[in-house]
Amino acid sequence: MSDEDRRDVVEVRDLVKRFGKVSAVDHVSFTIHAGEIFGILGPNGSGKTTTIRMLCGLMTPSQGTAIVAGADVSREPERVKARIGYMSQAFGLYRDLTVDENLSFYGGVYSLGAKLPERIEWAKQAMRLEEIGDRLSGVLSGGQRQRLALACAMMHAPVVVFLDEPTAGVDPAARRLFWTIIREQAAVGVTMIVTTHYMDEAERFDRLAFLSRGHLVALGTPEEVKHHFGTAGSLEDIFVSLQEKDA
């Protein structure tokens, strides 16, 4: 990618979220580049989910700023939502609709109009769903459902996509294919922001942010994060250490 293509599409500056006297997120700052696969990691209670909810325009920060895809999450939350894709662990696929019908439904939600047929064909090809368009989503394998969920989240061609534990509960082969697709989308400039508890997957991130008790405790490539903690071990060792500290 050119330097222009690697521009920052997420800019977080001194982001704070308070619930009463408790700061769930405490002056967190980082940037994310276009086409980057970026991880936001941390034990339960670290502020990870709260941070993501603010970046998606679902929660207003108490202090600080966050610009996502050119929109301010505090002043323009609806613009943020229109420019991002979000795939949750419990993504709302309709089990009694086929793959094609699910894609058509979400295309309608995003008001794609005349672009809908083209986007359905793109989604089926990009997510390896070409052969199962007429199959009910309720009978799909776990890996097929995950790929369909990502396709639905990307029907409107978002520039930033949030994936919350995207491969939870799927077999290793399905996880490998899913990560191939993530890499393909990042290669054409889509920014993928991922949470996971699979630390072997975290090794695949271009960069990651580790949160602990609301603070950003490490930021960088997987190797840079390991160096920051002074360990020759794995990211899993770091995660477990933070989990024990935060308990």
Image: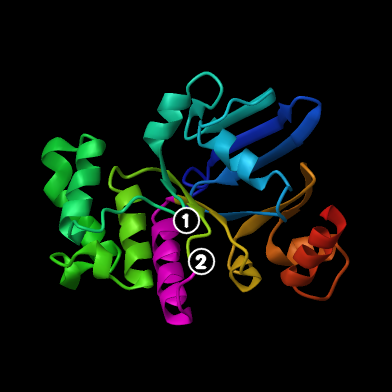
**Of residues 20 and 106, the one drawn nearer to the viewer in this rendering:** 20
Q: Main secondary structure of the magenta part?
A: helix
Q: Which residue is depicted at the point 25% across and 58% down? A: 95
Left-right relation of 87 to 220: left
**Mark 2 touches mark 1? (CB < 8 Å):** yes
User: Is residue 189 inside the magenta stretch?
Assistant: yes
> Can residue 133 be seen here?
yes
Image position, residue 217 (x, y; %):
80, 50
Amino acid carrying mark 1 in the image: Gln
- The magenta segment is 168-190
Residue holding disc 1? 89
137 and 65: which is toward the camera: 137
Q: Residues within 10 Å of mark 1 (few under 14, many from 20)?
A: some
Disc 2 from disc 1: Cα separation: 8 Å
The quadrant of the picture occupied by the C terminus is: bottom right
Identify which residue is drawn at 42% across, 69% down.
Answer: 178
Vertical relation: 34 (above or below) 140: above
Q: Which residue is mark 2?
A: 168
| Drawn side of residue 243 relative to residue 208, left or right | right
